[in-house]
Structures are given as structure tokens and as C-alpha cells.
Image: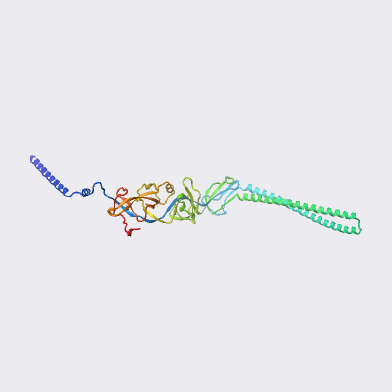
Amino acid sequence: MPQFAWKLGKTKVCFGGLWLLMGGMVAMITGCNPSPKTEAEAQQPQGQQEPASVDVAIARTTALTTGLEYTGTTQPYRQVLLRAQVEGQLLRVGVDVGDPVVPGQVLARLDDKVLTTAVIEAQAEMAALESEVAQAQTQVSDALRQVETARLQLQQNQADLGRYENLAKVGAIPKQQVEQARTTTGTARQALRSTQAVVRTRQQAVNAAQRRVKAQQAVVGREQKRLAYSTLTSPLRGVVLDRVSEPGDLAQAGSEILKLGDFSQVKVAVQISELELKRVRVGQSVQVRLDAFANQTFRGQVTRLSPMADPTARLLPVEVTIPNLEGRIGSGLLARVSFNQEATRSVVVPEAALQTNQRRFPRRQDISQEDSTQRQGSSQLGKLFVVKGSGKEAKVTARSVTLGQRREGQVEIVTGLKPGDLFVIRSSKALKEGDPVRLSILSESSSPQNAP
């Protein structure tokens, strides 16, 4: 037992010497080879920091296509409310929702008994007035015969008067007989005038009777038209959208019976921002996507621009029309309308290059109605850093820029940056005006072959 303890202690002493020997060797190595970091810190003047490593790119002009997308709802190209134009009980409705209709097709009927009776009464009244006209015309004919008789009598009396006057000159007859002939001639002349006045009076009666007949004809036509209103026909080729009334209902004039829609074309109404009004025009071609037909794109056209904007939201209604030759597009479908504009070349930089609080400016990727509304109060100013100099002399300068459109992570620079300028995309640490920088291996060079 004591021998075991001595051996264990001896072993312990040997291990202790080994650890001391290893510690001395490490100290020698460390003293002869100081770390790179310590050497760099020793060589670097006090107060000077390592330049930031930056990724640099060259500003170039890029074709940026403006894509405006708004959502709307499909509607029939033409929608008609078929209403009752006369009062009556609805006897029959021959179509239901979804049924196709064609112009002139009978869709519903009202009870027409009262209307038929009114037509018969109006026609009877017109017949009585026509009889009065016939009687008045007969009286006119009688008066004309009396005028002719009076005219002949006057001619005869005038001839007798002339003969008597000749005989009286030679003393063949007394003058008294001539005076009687003159009196008779005057009476005949007065009788002719009287019969002519009768003719005029009776002709006026005929004219009045004819006017009453004409007025009654209008009454008959009105009642016949009211009778025709008891049959409701389709004014268009389309589809029944709604069946408002049912047989047995008492329809008043103006009561809705059916709602019809013309789907030969489909309309989509969208609301656009006043800021985008200059980019949209009547006749412009647009693309329309429907969620109901996810794999298909429809070509439409702007058919109407409303001149009145919502005074609160500053949005204007725009109507887009889509052909619907196959009749597959219905009403109430969600539609996404894209107003694609021609590409314009602008200076474009990555969004990551902006150093200011650009998040106030909404992302513009297929601008929606909500984005356009938010844009009105958003800042369009930003800041990025431009690199001046090269190699160890490279420094950054803060540059204020005006922002334009945003699309797919890219930002249009309206003013403040020119093609060919070197700008910082990423930096290893925060930058400030005049800081020296070191270009990373990912940076672009401003050599002629890389210039825009």
C-alpha cells in the first residue's frame, strides 16, 4: 500500500513537469510570432478606421415598362329592366334566370280583358264620329245643289231684266214691269249669297267632325298600344338575369318583371387615380385577366373615361369593354385590368441602394388602386452614395435623388443620378459624407468597356 502511493505520487510529479515544459514552448512560439490582428493594429495609426467594403455598380438607362393594374367586376354590355307599362294581373312568365332570349320573343303576359274593352269602346266612338262626318258632308252636297239652283235662277232673272229694259226703251212695255224684273233679279242674287253661306257653314261642320274623328283615331291607337303592352317581349338578344315578378302578381305601370342582359360584349368598370389619368385614353388596348379563367388573357379596349372624379378619393371611373363571342364570360366576375404603357428608358437602380427611409414610397409592382391612392401623400425623394476617385483614394459622396416608378425591386431615378455614375449598392457598415471606401470584388469598374 505505501509502495502504490509512492508510485502514484511519482507519476504525478512527472506529469507536472511535462505541463511546465509545454507551457514554456507555447510562450516562446507566441513571443516570436505575434497575431496578424495585433500587427495590423500596431501598424495602423491611432484613430484611423478600416475603410468600409462596398459593392459598386454603374448607373445605366433601362427600358422600364409602366404596368397599371386595377380590379373591377364584369357587367353586361347592356342591361334592360323589362317593366309593365300598364296595370294588370301577371298571367304568365315564360322564361327563367339564365334562359337565352332573342328580340321579339314573348316573355310574359298580363290580363288584357279591361284593355280589350277600352279598345272596343274607342273604336265604337270613332265609328259614330265618322257617321257624323258623313252626314255633314251630305248636307254640304245639298247646300251646293241649292247654290247651283240659285245661280241659275239669278242668270235667268238677269237675262229677263236685260230684255225688259230693251223693250221699255222702244215703249213696248211699261217701265213698271222693268222695275219688277230688277227686284226679282236682286232677290235671286240675295238667295245665291244665302245658299253660298250655308255651304260654308256646313263645310266647317264637316271639318270639325273630321277633326273629332282624327282625335278619336288617336284614342283608338292609344288603347290598342296599351293592349299591346299586355304582352311583354324581349328588346335584345341576351340572357335573363333576374325574374322579379311571378304569375298572379298585380303589376302596376312601372313594375319590374324581368331583368335582361346583353353579353355579346362585357364591360368592366375600374377606378383609377387622377395621377394616372394622363396614361389612359379612349380606344387604348388593355389586358384583362379573370380569376374564373386563370390561364387565359383577354384583350379589351377603353371605351369611356368619366370626366367626374370622386372628390374624396380622387378616383375616376373608367369603362373597359371585352369581346365575348363565345358567351363564356358572365356577370359579377373579378377582373384584373392592366393598362400597359410603352417602355421608356430611364436611369434605374436597385431598391437596396437607397439610403433614406424609402419605405414611405409604396412599391409599384402592377400598381393597384390602393397603391395609387397612397402615393399622393408619399415622399418621392431619396438618397444614395456615389463613389468618387479610385483605389485608395475612393470616397463616397451623398447624392439626393428624385424617385420615380418602382417595379420588381428596381427604382427609377428621375433626377440626381446620371448614366455612368458609380453608386453604392451595399456597404459593410454605415456610410457618411466623405468616408473612404474599398471596392469589393463584386463591384463594377468604370472602364470604357463597361460604360453604358
Image position, residue 106 (x, y; %): 57, 52
In-image side of 223 versus 422 (left or right): right
Query: 387 or 13, which lies in front?
Result: 387
| Image quarter of the N terminus | top left
Q: Is residue 408 visible?
A: no
Image position, residue 388 (x, y; %): 32, 53
Residue in view at x 79 percent, y 55 percent: 147
Report the label total. 0
Query: 205 or 69, which lies in front?
Result: 69
Query: 272 or 230, which lies in front?
Result: 272
Image position, residue 48 (x, y; %): 26, 48
Residue in view at x 86 percent, y 54 percent: 182
In-image side of 303 versus 165 (left or right): left
In-image side of 444 versus 78 (left or right): left
Q: Is residue 158 visible?
A: yes
Figure coloring: rainbow
| Image quarter of the C terminus | bottom left
Residue in view at x 90 percent, y 58 percent: 169
Image position, residue 165 (x, y; %): 88, 58
Query: 316 or 449, which lies in front?
Result: 449
Image quadrant in which you'd find residue 66: bottom left
